[in-house]
Structures are given as structure tokens and as C-alpha cells.
Amino acid sequence: MKLRHSGYIIVTAALAIALVSCGKKEDTTSETPAATTAPAGQPVDAATAGTITGTIKLDGTPPAPGKISMAAEAYCAQQHPTPVPAEDVVVGPGGTLANAVVYISDDMSKWATTIPSTPAVIDQKGCMYHPHVVAMVAGQQLQITNSDQTTHNIHPLPKDNAEWNLSQPPGSAPMMKTWNRPEDAIAVKCNVHPWMKSYMFAFKNNYFAVTGPDGKYSIANVPPGTYTVTVWQEKYGNKTTSVTVPAKGTATGDVSFNAASGD
Amino acid sequence: MPEPNSPDPIVSKSFSTILLISVFLLMVTVAWSLYDEFFGLRPWRGYQRDFTAAYEKYLTKQIAQEKKTEAAVFAAPDYIQLKSNLDAAQKSVQSADAQLDQQLALLEEQRAAMTPAFQDARGKVVALIYQMEIVPVSDKSGRASRQKDLDEAKNEIHEVEWPTGGGAVEVKKWKYDDLNQTFTDLMAAKAALVVKRADTDTPVKDAQDKLNDYVKRNLPGLSLAALEGLRNSLTTFKVDLRQINVNPTGTMINNLGGAGLVDRCQSCHIAMDPLVVPVTMTLTKADLGMAKSHDAPFTTHPDPELFKFHSLEKFGCSPCHGGNGRALDSVEKAHGRYEHWLWPLNYPENYNAGCQNCHAADMVTEHAEVLNRGRSLYRTRGCIGCHKYAGFDDENERLTATRQQILQLESTKSAYALQIPRLNTQADQASDNTTSHQLRDRALNMTVESAKLDSQIEALDTLSSSLMREVKRVGPDLKEVQMKLRKEWIPVWLAQTHTFRPTTKMPQFRLEPDEIQKIAAFIWQSGITGQTLPNQAAGDANHGKQLIQSRGCMACHSLGEGGNAVGGDYAANLSRVGEKDNYNYLVRWVHNPRERTLPYCPFEKKDITPADYAKHGLPFQFDLDHSRCPNDGHQLEVQQPTIMPSLRLTDSDSRDIASFLVTQKHADATYSAAPFMDDPKFAAAGKALVQHYGCAGCHEISGLEDEGRIGTELTNEGSKPIERLDFARYTEDAKRGIQTNGKPDPRGTWYDAKGFFEAKLVNPAVFDYAKVKPDPMDRLRMPTPNLNDALPGITPKNNLDALTSFLLGSVDPQLPPEYMYKPADRRKAIQEGWWIATKYNCIGCHQIGIGQKTIMQDLPFYQSDAKANLPPSLTSEGARVNPEWLRQFLANPSLSTTDTNKNGVRSYLEVRMPTFFLSDDEVRKLVLFFGALSSQAEPFIPEKRVPLTTAETELARDLFTNPAAPCLKCHATGDPTHDKTATAPNFILAGERLRQPWAERWVTDPAKIIPGTAMPSGLFNRVGDRWVFNGKLPSAFDNYHGDHADLMVRFLLAMTPEEQRRLGGRTPSGGGAAPSGK
């Protein structure tokens, strides 16, 4: 009985409060919806844009490159009178590192991205991938050719993109593919020739480059500012440096890996 | 006498104040009742109003968006192209169509013109024929006259105004036969024209289909018209009670038949009404602009997939979610969150509890990950060792029952044995022949009956041997402690179970120091003595470490401590094995964990020693093939009751692994001497304690093999009324929402089943608090379960939620039997199979269910490139392999009796498919399980295989050795040099193992069946209705019009070693060497 009584009192009190606060409704005003379509990004002012260049090197004694054995397939072996060295660390004179991927790792979404109309290219020749490392813009076409007189299968192992594995017999037409999502270091292999290995990068912007045999790279059309530049190397992983690009100027971002510390 | 001047009450007294107060009170109560009517007791009215307003806004926004999208699609060049294609197609057939239509119209006119005359004539003729038929055969003249009438009718001339097109008419004079013929011709001509018209229209139809396809692809979701329809329907929206009523019509609400379900949840959760928000639409609070509101029950169901097999009309809401579906007064009432409602709404972390309501017979329920985890924990963490639960691991009970039956039959048999000679004697001495015959017959019948009993006993014996294989204990066999363990380690382990091994499945018992000593001493002294293991040479620990990584041990076990632990949570963490285990024992264990030191005879209730065998002149040999007791002939327990399978490792590999394991220890670990371990006084006291704490529920212990479970059965624990859950001293605190640590409970109260289970699981002693129990034996004895997990990303809270959900869902069925998920069709095989697939942790290595993750695939060892070395995915196994082959494979995965240190199929994989020593019943269930998962018919009838003709064989060889089909680069051949680099199975196995229809689907697009497989797609191209090889073909194929994939598969399924050897030579550089002699 007592309980019920107090119940009424509570209800009455609630009623009173409700009456007083009548009209004051739950805040349901619609919030501004999150931007569903990202703004296309502003174009870089060519008049002020600068360039980042540099050389990627390996300090210390470079590891002796392993030799690839193609004994499993006579055709492949015939293409190479001398055994092909492994490509995980390709060192030039003075310790320059080829096949390193250099890119601005800051958020660059404010700037417009151009998807090149020409495709990125990878060729299977002499039972090796050329180039060993391919970097492209996400959404850019990728052209895969087979210059060999043997069947290869191209089997990338992406984590964020869709995986596929296709056979490409000799003499077949180039294959056109696209990585629609940005992703780093997609390992690519050929199940038929297990020594064949390549890495692909799909970037969300245009600020990247792959070093040549001289270890040099150049990233052009960079708006002035200070950036974090990340360097990826197949064996030694990632390393970063900071560069400041002056208007119309050139910034240098040299990075050295240490042969001893790498495992 | 009243005073003369006393005032007249009518004049002087006023009731106006009272009246005023009464009027005011009346007004207040009227206002109150009105408020209650519209708001107070009907909160759903407000919800519905809020919802419709927000929903309308949302729809308006969507409509605007859809208009834009539609306009964009209609302006897209592709659309315009398709549209113009359609227009062009329409135009191109216009004249032809018009002509055909004209012809059809004329035919129709002609038909109409002749129909009256034709029908009239036909009616007459048919009637006359009937008249003639009924004339008796003998009445010849009658027949003749009728014949004459008929001939006259047939010769009668009918005039038809026959249209000939363009309005012209010709008068035709036709007899009946002419009419009939003309009509038939007319119909045939019309049918031909209709077909022709459809043919002409094909391009239009194709173009239309393409356009529709394009629109469907680019405008997914609800169309503009549908969205507008929804918005328009809101104008007539009526704020009203909405309910799902699952009852036979006419039954009263208080006397419900059927499901007895009345759910009014949609009255507030209005977006769940499919008439308001279509099921294909998803609506979030953010969509309605209420992202931050805590009082907006307007989202659509997060897993609409569930409605495909749980229709709202049949299941409503409360059977899955709990709550009081009928209540509408308040959120608390509706959600059943008050003391007198037995089934409160499940909290989000326990949503899966609702599934168990009907899915109590499942081990794995799709869409119910939390529940599945709870069930699995209940089994693997040993809850089942003390708490019986219907359907869970009842092999031991069945085994006991079987043995009882055997004993009973045996006693009947011995009774017969006594009676038969007695009856025979009586028969010999009977006074007359009739009696003698009767007695003799009885004796004979009894003899035959006795022989029948023998076969019955034999069958039960086989069953018991099968069940013995199936009985697995959660913890290790403690009979072998003296051979296996370091003596001083046992008391340390009992005292600090969870400190020593933080992820162990063994719970932590609350033991007094003297209890520990007694229990440890008993365990030690009850172990087998006098048996020694052979001394093993030291192995290569580094190689052992590699093997542990690569052979698949980590799918169950983990290595590394704390945050560094890597591996599965199904079996023990091996980090400190070196501190406790004997090397020689480990070698034997790794080599074959099922190997026992002494077999156990359940009838004599003792371990059988070599002496027992010697007494009967038998060699001391016991295994699955030598499993009879030398003393009584019954089935012995010849294996350790561990779940761990044999990996068929060599002796040397076993030594290497054991050598690595003994290095796994803390360098600074010291153990103080424990002299009490050998003190018989301690052991005697320990036995009672071991029984009290139910150790034998999980461990095999000498003398306690038949101990039952000591805990409460939990099958219906979730249905226990709250009064029967003893919160003891915490009853009041729980009601008031004060946690055991004194802090306020975030839920407000924990006086419910959830609160009880969670408190008990975290600290089983909690309800002993503040009770005076001087005798430790009176205290709550449930040990603290280990909720830690070796799997990264699984927190103790996850495990607590999983177990709580499982217990909350363990209820008396509240729905009629037809709601219970006990399928009789192939789903039954799936339901049963999951119990075995989880029991042996098949899912640690193999993907079986689509979307199911394995432990292996997340191990660091198998990332990126090494993915190809993972155990195969089995999502299509039932369609892939011949079930008879699968039966043999499961029984012996090496597919060989001599060469067992390998995988039978994927010999190239480092990871090893173990031998599980499954019982026949388990093998049968697994084979049916895989078949059912792939929708295979049962029983299996092998497909008919069409052998290749000689010509086809030649063609197939060309395909197989074509440079564009480098099959033997990856597929094993049996040649050891070649197979070193092989990454796919040998074709020799294919014929017996694979099913042809699957193999054809596989070679044409393997990535469709197993995404990520090493086998490439694109070996064949689809050309028209056949698969054509993707490569340069020799000219011999010019005249071959068959399917190339079919040809290849038939060839592969018929592959012989000889053929493979020949082709090895033909394949350019492909494994040319001769295969090994096998």
C-alpha cells in the first residue's frame, strides 16, 4: 500500500515536471550529415609547386645476393646463361638502393589526385618480373604482359583489395587490371615459378616514386610545406625522414638503411 | 432545546471551499487520465509521432538524392547508348512487326467470320454421330437412316462471308469437311505467326534486358517510385498499436494456443514494421538525425539476413530477445526489466542467448558467434566436467549404460547356463514323452537364446569400444603422473594454477595449504608405479621448434607468455612445459599422445599389467586392434582419453620436438622439496578431497574412473526463478545496484540471472561472503574458471559474455516443439557434424563453414606468401570428394599402412593432417556432415564416367602437355626430386578421390570455389556453351567440338602412373624423371 502511494507521488511529481518542461523536446535537430562525397581536392598551383629528390642508400657491407635457381624449368634456365641474383636487395655503386618506394606519408587528401591515363606496366620476361616493384595510383590501369614462351600465372596477395590468380599462356594478349583501393606492398607471385616475386603499390595520391639503379628518386609537383617522406625497402622495411619543400624549390630527402641492423 | 438565536446552518455555513477543492481535484484527475491516455500509459504514441516526422524528412532527402542519381544514370553515355540501341531495335523491327500484326489481325477476322457457321455445323455433326452410335447393332435399317442423316448434314452447304483483307469480303460455300480443314489451317497459321513475331522481337527483348540490367546495376536499392510511395503512405499513417500475434484465430489472450506469442514491440520500434520500412531498407539513428539520442528506438534490424529463416510473422521479437512483448506501459515493463518477469530483454553483449531457446541441440549456430564461443568454452574449459548439460559429451554416460547392459545380459546368460542342464535332466526323467519333449524344447530354445545373447553382447562390446574412443577428458590422465611430472611441481600447480599458466583451461581451486598437500600426495601416490619408459637420446631443439611451427601444432597450442603468446587457445600454452614434464615421457607423448602405459579394464575396474597378460600366456600388447581384456574378454580402454591426435611423426622428429619443449621454462624456476608427496597418510586424506572437488570430472584418476559429475545440471539454468538463485548476503545490494566492490552497477541493478551468472563466473566464492563456515568442506567449492584467452583480441570479458549468454539461453523451451531446431533432413547431419568438427578442433586448421576463420590463417607464420602452405579449405569438400574415399581418408589420413610419416593427399604440405583415431560413428557422421554441407544426396551414388575414346585420349594428352597447361609444374607426380617443389596433389589420386562435376567446376574457375587458391583461373575460356582451352591448340582440335574442360577432367580422373610417366617426358621441362618405385 505504502509502495503504491509513493508510486502515485512519483507519478504526480513526474507529471508536474512534465507539464513544466512541456514543449522542451528531445534534441533531435538533424546534424549536418557527414560529407559523403569527399571534395575532389584542390589542384596544386604549378607556379609554387616544388620537388623532392634524393638518393636511397644502404650503409655498411651489402649482403651477398642469393642466386635464383631456375632448374625446375628448362626454358627459364635457358634464358639466363648466368644465374640471376635475387632481387630483395639490389645495390648499385656507392651503396645506392634500387627498387625502394619513396612516398609522402602525410594526409594529402586536400590536393587533387590525377589518375594517369597510361597504364602502369609489368612484364614477365626471362621468368622474372620487370620491374620488380611497381607503384601506381589506385584506380590506374595495370598492364600485365607475358614475353616468355612459357605459361605464367599472376597471383597477387593483397590484404585490402580483392585477390585474384590468373593464368597467362605465352602469346596471349596483355591483361588489364586495376587496384581500386590504396594498398602498400602487395606481394605478387607466380605459383608455377615460385622464385618469381614482385611488389605492387597503389597510392591514393601522386606523391610517390620508385628508385632506379642509381638509388635516385624524384617526386614532382609538391605543394610547398613540410612532409614526412617514407621509404619502403623489401628487406629492410620502412624508414621515414622529414623534408621541407620551398615554393618552386627542391628539397632533398636522402635516406640510408643499415645493412647490419636489417634482418 | 436549541438556542433561539443559533445561526441557520444553511445560511451561515458554506461548502464552497470543499466544493472548489473537489472541482479542482476532479479537473486534475481528468487531466491526469487524459494525459495517461495519450502520453503516460502510451509512450509508443510519442515514439510513433517522432518517428514519422523524422522518417518523412529522411525520405524527402532520399528522394532528392535518388532523383539526382537517376538523372545521372539516364544521362550516362552507357545508358544513352543502351537506350538508343533499344530504340533502334524497336525501329528496325517496326515494319516487320506491323506486317505480322496485320496478318494476325486478318487471321483473327477470318476466324471470327467462320466461327458461327463452323460451330453450328460441328454441333450438328457431332450430335448425329452420337445418335447413330446409340442405335443397337441389330437395327440395321435404323443405322442406315441415321447414316443418311449424317451424310446429309455433312454435305450441307454453309455460306461464310470470308474477309480477304482490306475490308474485302468473298462469299465461300463450304461443306462441313471444308470448314473443319480451314479452321485447323487457320489455327496452325496463327501459331506460326506468333512464333515468328516473337523471333522478330528478340533483338528488342535483348536490348530491353540489357537496359534493365544496366539500370538495376546502377540504381540499386529502392526506386524513386517506391520511395515516393513510402512517403505518400506516411500521410495516411495512423498512430496505432502494432502487434505480431502468433495464435490460432479465435483463441483468447489468456488462453493462448500455439506459440502463445503476442509481441507489440513494433509499437515503439516502428522501423521494424515492414509495412512502414521495407525489409530491404536499412535505417540508422544517424539517418533520422537522432545519432545522439538515447531514446530513439527506430533503427532497422542490424542482421536482416536472420529474417530469411525467422519470419517476423512467425517468430515475433521476444522469443529471441526476451522481454515482455505484450507490455506497453513503459520501457522497463516492455523490456521485462522488473522483478517479476522471468525473461528480461537480453543486453547487447548477450543477444545470442535468445538463439539457444530453439537451437539448444546445436553446437554451432550460424549468426551466433558469441553463443558458439560460449558453448565451446563450456566444453573446453571443463565446465562440463562437473555440470551435466543435455547433449554435451554424454559418451561416458552412454558407456556406463552399455556396460550395465552387458552385465545384465551376461547374468541372464549364466542363469540359462544353469537352467539348461537342469531342464535336460528333468526331460530325461520325465514320466511321459509329451512332458519330456516340452522340457527338451525349452532347454533347446534356451540354448539358442543364449547364442543370441552372445551376439548381442558382442555388439554392445563393439559399441563400448567405439564409445571408449569417443570419451575424451578435458584434463590429462593422472594415472601416469609418476612417469610424466616433476613431483614438486604438483603442489605448486594446485596453488597457483593461473599464475603458472595464465591461459590454462584448468580452473583455480580455493584450497587450504594442507588440502593442497593431501590432494597432491593422493594424485602422486595413486599413479601407476613400477613402469619405466625407454631412455631417449637428446634431439635437435632447433629443428623441433621449426616442426612445432610448421606441422600445425600452433592451431591448438600457443607458445610465448603474456602479450607474446602466439597460437591457438584450444590446447595448452607450452611455455613452461620444461619445468614440469619428463623428457622421455614427452617424446612418447609427441609421438603418439594416445599411447597408454597400462590398459584399463572397466569391468574389473583395474589397470591390466603385463602380469595379467602373462597369466593367460599372452604377450603384453594392447592397441585398437588388440583391445580385449586377457582376464574377462571385454573391451579395454587402450588409449589415453586425450583429444590430442597423433601427427604420425618419426621417432627422431618426436625427439626434436620434445627437446625443444624441455627448453621451455623459466630459467629461475625453483621447486622446494615436497616430502609429504610420498607420505601415505596424506594420500589417504587426499582421496576424499579429490572426490569432494570433483577432480575426476576432468581427469582420469586411479580408483575414481567411474566418479560422476559433482555440480548442478545447467541445461535449464537460465529458467531458474530469481528466488532460487542464492545471492546470499548480496541480495539487497544486488537489488539496489551496488556491486560487490561497493561501486554502483552501471545497469542499475544486478538482481537477475545475468548478474548472478557473471558474479559467480568471475568469483565463484562471492556468495560465501560474510557467511560463517568454519569447515572448509562447507564452503562453495566451485573453482574459479579461467576466462583469459591465448587468442589475441579475446578478452576475459568476451569469454564472460560468451559463457553468460550460453547460460542465459539455457532455458525450458517457452515455445511449442515445432519451433525447436531439430531438423530431420540433411540439416540434421550438419547439426550433428558440428559437434565432432568442434570437438577435435577441425576448425583450428580448416575452413568448413563459409566465412569461418581458422586459427592457422591468422598465425604470423602463415602470412602473405606462406598462405599457400595452409591446410586446405573444406567449404566444398562434400561436393569435391567421393564419400567412401573420405571415410578411408579420415580413418587414416596418410592413406598408407607403411609409409605414414606424410599426408596422404597433400604430401607437399609441411602441416600435417593428424590421425584422430575417430570411432566408426564419428567418421560416419563427419562424412555425412561434409556431404550435407555441400547439399549432396544421400546415400551416395557415384557419377557415371564416360571413358575417353582413343582419339579423345590423344587430344587430352595434347591438352595436358600444352605449354599453356603447366599442370605438372605444381602437381605432385610421386617423383621425389620433382615433388620437392610440388604444391598440389598427385593426379593418380584423382580418379578415386574426386567427383567429376566438382572437378569440372574447379578447373574452369578454382578461385570461385576456394578464393586465394594457388591454382590459377583462366585456363579455359567460355565460348558459347562450352569451355575452350586458353592456349595455342594443335590442328587436331579443329574438328573437336566437345568441351575442353570436360575432356581434361575425364583424362585426369583416369590418370595412371604409367600415363603420368609417359607424359612427364612429353611435358616441356615438367618433372620428367621417372617416379619412384611405389
Image: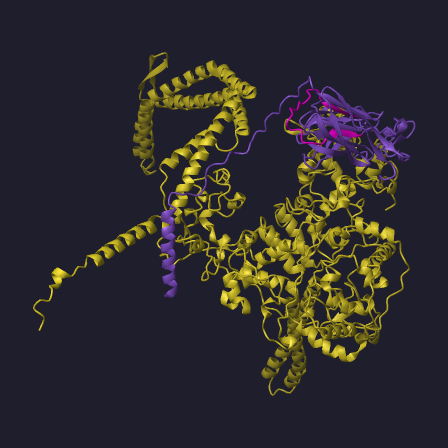
Chain colours: A purple, B yellow
Asked which quadrant contains residue A37, the reply is top right
Asked whether A119 falls inside the magenta stretch, the response is: yes
Pinpoint residue B116: horizontal percent, then vertical percent. 31, 24
- A235 displayed left or right of B222: right
Q: Is residue A72 above or below residue B726?
A: above
Pinpoint residue B744: horizontal percent, then vertical percent. 54, 58
The residues colored magenta run A100-123
Q: Is residue B952 above or below residue B755?
A: above
- B762 displayed left or right of B654: left
Q: Is residue B1032 in view from this perspective? A: no
Q: Is residue B35 in view from this perspective? A: yes
- All told, the count of numbered labels is 0
* Residue at the farthest left position: B4
The residue sitting at 43% across, 49% down in the picture is B265
Pinpoint residue B878: horizontal percent, then vertical percent. 66, 46
Asked which quadrant contains residue A55, the reply is top right
B760 and B119: which is toward the camera: B760
Q: Main secondary structure of the magenta part?
A: loop
Pinpoint residue B762: horizontal percent, then vertical percent. 62, 61
B463 and B181: which is toward the camera: B463
Asked whether B506 falls inside the magenta stretch, the response is: no
Q: Is residue B87 above or below residue B1014?
A: above
Asked which quadrant contains residue B389, the reply is bottom right
B852 and B119: which is toward the camera: B852
Q: Is residue A139 above or below residue B831?
A: above
Q: Quadrant of the N terminus of chain B?
A: bottom left
